[in-house]
Image: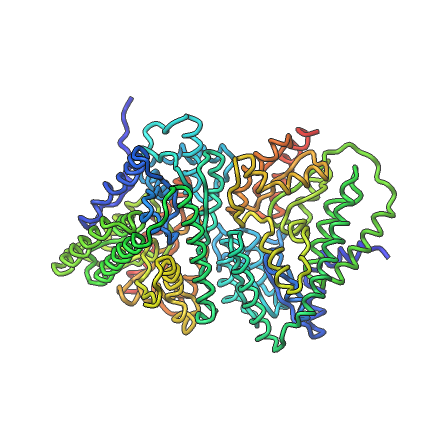
Amino acid sequence: MEEREPAKTTATKGTDAARKIRAMVKNIYKSCHEAQSQGKKVAYIMVSSQYDEILRAMDIVPLPTENYAGLCAAKRDMDRFLTKAEEDGYSQVLCSYARIGLGFDSLRKELGGMPENAPDGGMPLPDIILGSSGVCDPRFKWFQACGRFMTAPTYSIDVMHPPVHCDLNAVRDHYVQYQKVQFEGLIAFLEKQTGKPLNKDRLWETIRLGDEAWRLWYESDRLRTAKPCVMPSQDHFNVMVPAYYYSGTQEAVDYFQDLVDEVKYKVENKLAVVPDEKYRILYGGGLPPWHTMWFFNYFESFGAVFVIENQYRGFDPVEVPDHVKDPVEYLAWRAFLRYTARHEQAKANSGNPVVEKILDLIQDYDIDGVFFHACRSCRATTIGQIHTKNMLGRYSDLPMTQFVSDMVDLRDYSEAQWKAQIHAFLDAMASRKK
Amino acid sequence: MSAVPQIEEFYTQRGKRARQLRDAGQKVVGYFCCFVPDEIIAAFDMVPYRIQGCPSEPIDRADAYIEPMACPFARSCLNMAVKGDYDFLDGFVAPHSCDTIERMYSIWHHNTPAAFNHFLNVPHMMGPSSDTFYRKELEFFIKALENWSGRTLDQEKLKETVKLYNRRRARLRELYALRKPDPPLISGVEITELMVAGMGIPACEHIELIDNMIAEVVKRPKPKHQKLPRIFIWGNEIDDTAFIRLVEDSGSYVVMDDLCTGSRIFWDDVPETDDPLDGIVSRYLHINCPRSYIPAAGNREEDLQNRFGHIGDFVKQWRADGVILYIIRYCDTCELDGPDLREHLNAMGIPVIMIEDDYSISTIGQLRTRIQAFLEMII
């Protein structure tokens, strides 16, 4: 039988730093398997739950299930997990990250071991499951549903932020206090699971490392304002790995220092992603199509490069007041400040923090067009894109487009439609430039 | 006089009574979902209006503002708003009930702004700190209403309103008890009409309708005994009779529900506490909605019992023979609870069918075959 070459799903990167990520992803799952053999606790986690440094400080090894779904899609090995979840009764429009995760868990339980040839060795059974309400609803409901396939102790926290219209001075203490109590509940749960108390000095250290990595990440993004573009968005969707999954480690700090050095060097030497940069595109929102990341290169073949993103982007650095002396309170303050960073700006202008952020990016990165990706199964990052586009249209005449597929479910993707839409978008940017 | 014509009038001409009250000088405040305590709005002498969609109308305008992969109920509501069907709302309140409604707040109030717009944050987690948080959010809500109305909330008035609303809850429980006999004394379609009619009128008027309906039902001749399956319906929004009618017309009795347009909104009373907010917090934050996280408890069986025990109790008490899980497409929280709830009910020996629907009566034909097959299976 003729062997078929596996479909190419990934994009060619622009930086050496991005090319190092594949090994870091592999290491996430490898380190989970190793950790369990060393008696450490491995926890299913949700990205951007604001609790990363707590886990690192307590020697809990994070196992990011959403990332694993993206990995399966990049490997085009998602169908067996998606269909398993659907056989189990989960809807085809349910978050496809959740479907892959639940399908994987179901298959692992049914087989009594790891599914054959699972990408990167597969996800081991976790010792603990940690959900959160930060970002979207499935991030705690999915982990609740995991109870069908395993018996790991499960805990979830709220990550709440205030609406834009509120008086921040009036609500600040209320939100910070609630967030702090949520973290304290999590810590008490983890102390019970690990049998060890949290060392607050150690937490301060992981926070320092987490903040430093994110500061460097931010610095690298600011360097990317340079023209021509030296680090495209496909690289961003790789370098987010140490930011989110190695948060609170020296490894992440070292990684981002190298990234800053490399981007600086490329900027100084004008080492462009494309030789003749015609259009600079902002990835305006929506989870990336992990199954088809080469579309970035397809754009590049026409001189169009994605120069910055409003997705999986780090929070801008925030200044927690000096009077905060407790690391748990610091985390609560930091979460509040991160989520409200553009509230005042929004109140004074458009009324919408996302719009404000995108307008800032358009100006700072000299953008020619804005691209959104609507994912059929992701409510959190998709709903509001049309609204954002509509509002941006009041302040900008840039061409904007919304592509539809899914972050991991290939059944929602049409290459022919995408290519047609890509050309229409390129034409729109060309017309505006005339 | 029969209550039915008036119920049908309020059911079919939604917003009519609210418009009348507005014309008479009262403010009307529209709100989404179960997590906005409408007692608070009523205690300001305003008319709380539960926002509903219209599954018999195509969503022809909302797609310019919101993505088609959002909850079709929410899209239908927005569709009506942008067409001007909700132009009688002086205020708009959206709770943080789920991802779609949270995002809907910004979309709605930017495109169809009311004089008063408020977002009510609601914790997903349950516990003492969540109670404290939600209480504070309610205090902000009250303050916002005070600023808008120029009036201070009268605590005694709020206490009275809590009592009034509890009276309505008690009447509704009484009404639902009429579904316990076999055959039930009142149909699921009649119940749905009465529940929907009550969403846009003052509680005291709704109580009158319920009382009249109960009086009428108990006087009816005893229904002819037919051995038909008794059905329990779980899910989210059913604010149209089409689906319930389909289930009943296919040869069954719809005898009980756990819907956010049904028992979920009224089953538990608000405790009548010295500080009325204490009681309101303890009732509203602990509504058993899939969007809330009930902390893990014990082994799998115990955890399912902890999460769904109340549904099992309803099924037993109303002697349901089968359960329909009616999920409006793109509702992630219901989609994730569905298989677990099915497991729990199957363990009780109850047959279950999961239906995912588009909140459109145009899908009724497709559903008919599935419902009929399910009913045949459980007879």
| Extreme residue in the top direction | A1
Image position of A66 (left or right of B314): left
Q: Quadrant of the C terminus of chain A?
A: bottom left
Q: In this figure, which colouring scheme has been used for the structure?
A: rainbow
Pick the residue in front: A389 or B121. Answer: B121
Total tally of numbered discs in the picture:
0
Pick the residue in front: A14 or B94. Answer: B94
Is the residue B85 above or below the residue B315 in the image?
below
Quadrant of the rendered structure where residue A182 is?
Answer: bottom left
Q: Residue at x 17, y 48 (%)?
A: A16
| Extreme residue in the bottom direction | B150
Image position of B251 (left or right of A139): right
Is the residue A174 above or below the residue A17 in the image?
below
Q: Residue at x 78, y 57 (%)?
A: B209
Residue B119 locus on image (x, y percent): 52, 64
Q: Residue at x 65, y 38 (%)?
A: B312
Residue A305 locus on image (x, y percent): 25, 55
Q: Visible in this render: residue B291?
A: yes
Is the residue A65 above or below the residue B282 in the image?
above
